[in-house]
Image (cartoon, rainbow, N blue to C red):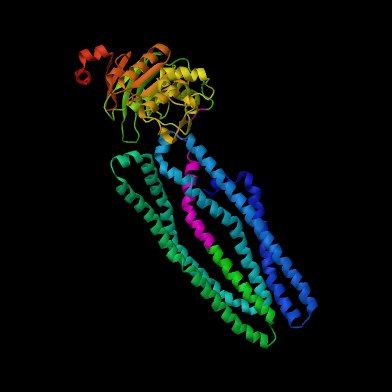
Amino acid sequence: MLRILLSRVREYWKYAAITPLFMIGEVAMEVLIPTLMAYVVDSGISASDMGVIGRVSVMLVGAAMLSLAFGMLGAWSASKASAGFAKNIRHDEYAKVMSFSFADIDKFSTSSLITRMTTDVQNVQMSFQMMIRICVRAPIMFIFAIIMVWHNGGVLSLVFAVAIPVLACGIYFILSRTHKYFTKAFKGYDVFNRVVQENLNGIRTVKAYVREDQQQALFNDSAADIRDNFKKGQKIMAFTNPIMMTVTFVCIITLSYLGAKYINIGTLTTGELLSIYTYTFQILSSLLMVGMVIVMFSVSWASIVRIAEVLSTEPSMDSNEEGETSIADGSIQFDHVSFGYGKDSVVLDDINLDIKSGEMIGILGPTGSGKTTLISLIARLYDTQSGTVKVGGRNVREYNLKALRDNVAVVLQKNTLFTGTVSENLRWGNPDATDEAIRKASDIASVTPFIASMKDGFDSHVEQGGTNFSGGQKQRLCIARALLKNPKILILDDSTSAVDTATDAQIRRALREDVQHLTKIIISQRLSSIMEADQILMMENGRIVDRGTHEELLSRNEEYRMLYETQEGDKKNA
């Protein structure tokens, strides 16, 4: 997992490589300063030698300036490396998600993927920055300071043989109890993001049913869960500073007692004892910093695992980059096709179907009968579990995936528009579409009438999610967008459900007369939308239970006849 992530440093490896060098320079200067101070006390101040005091003072200022410079350069290079590292991870995660099939996205979840590209990446970025700075600085500081204490104080360094294990045990005690709380807190972001996403996407439903209080309670619960876990972890972390200070002061008291004795007998100077005090802080603080790095790394480990899981997931659907790019026509064949979303689920069961190029097919069936799943297999939004789907006489798996989807335009019932202008949204179907092509597709989809009434026409602004358009207008815009792809197959999945019957009839007439070459598949519960189809499929429980023209089904299928009479009766009553 670390190899997968660290390979994303890429062009920022130079900044990551020079950061430890700056840290070594900073540590060297910091360790040198106490020794210079000891020298100025023993050889300058004690001997009243102003020459020594002046020379060493200049050296102290120089060492301090160099330490500051190395520290600033290290912070700059570490920030550059970690920010670039995070940028590359987000880029690769997003690119990987874009390559996922619907099944792959279903395996994760939208809220979880958002967390993995935001909070988790931020955690990893902080850990990486600490690794290239603190993980280098703290151990080197520890080693250098121990050496200097041994050099200046000799046996006084044995004090740390007791102090270091005590502080290490205290840090371990804290780490072992905080890790689980921080891990739970970051996992809680998945739930938190899901609640926020659902409520923002469904804000109209929330307000329509006056569920603000209940949804606010859900939000508060998820936020409180994160807060409580962080609070529990921070309560334990609060013991860090008292433990650190206690060990430090005990060391100083012990060193003062022993140091005074050694000064009296002449084996230690006052300046050397003062330098040991400074080195004591450096030794224990470096050990504490190592502990903090371990805390951050242990907290981030869950994020590392989650990010690596996305990056290492191979898309379940091969895009077949070297596949066939030319599709002969819009003919479709299903040969003993079965499919389910899980091992034990059966959504489609032994489907056999033959659609000729240019035909109009209507699909009718209750919710859960497999209608949307059936048409999803044509564009390879999912792959069959058994059997084959052919388009243009070839197995859909033999085509380059982009080429296949460019030739199969699917308009779903839940339509999505993106922030921008109307023309920009329509050009999703064809970035190079001319204004004339846009007008033609808009005429067929009955977009032109309501666009003409808008001040800016096709340059009118589209709010996020298309909230400034009605449901029927969004459906018509999405149909026009699909037509601009100039596909060989057009699939409308209940995509005129919000359109009035008169406009629906206009769209069907235009589809029948203006784009006769297209194979058209229309899923609808409105019989008037599919009555003129060359073939109507009736689906139930994942199977095609009957098929035929409107007249054929009306004459022999009781269920179809009852549905027709009900809808026609409703029209007359209306």
Q: Is residue 460 above or below residue 446?
A: below
The residue that appears at 37% across and 16% down in the rendered structure is: 355
Query: Quadrant location of residue 49?
Result: bottom right
In this orientation, which residue lies closer to the viewer: 569 or 387?
Answer: 569
Q: Position of residue 146 (x, y in %)?
A: 63, 71
Q: Residue at x 65, y 58 (%)?
A: 72
Report the number of numbered marks.
0
Question: In the current view of this chain or complex, which residue is farthest to the bottom?
Answer: 264
Residues in magenta, as a range = 292-320
Pick the front one: 58 or 534: 58
Q: Is residue 326 among what the camera can see?
A: no
User: Considering the image in quadrants, where does the C terminus appear?
Assistant: top left
- Residue 317 on the magenta segment: yes
> Which residue is painted at 49% across and 67% down in the image?
171
Task: Evaluate whether residue 369 shows in this view.
Answer: yes
* Residue 510 counted in the magenta span: no
Residue 563 coordinates in the image, percent (x, y): 22, 21
Question: As drawn, is 247 to the left or to the right of 570?
Answer: right
Counting from the top left corner in percent of width and height, residue 490 is at: 41, 20
Question: Is 60 drawn above or below residue 101 in the view shown?
Answer: below
Q: Main secondary structure of the magenta part?
A: helix
Location of residue 261 in the rendering, given as x and y in whole percent from the top left corner: 63, 86
Q: Is residue 442 above or below residue 119?
A: above
Decide: is 504 above or below 265.
above
Which of the 4 image quadrants contains residue 336?
top left
Most extreme residue toward the right is 51
109 to the left or right of 124: left
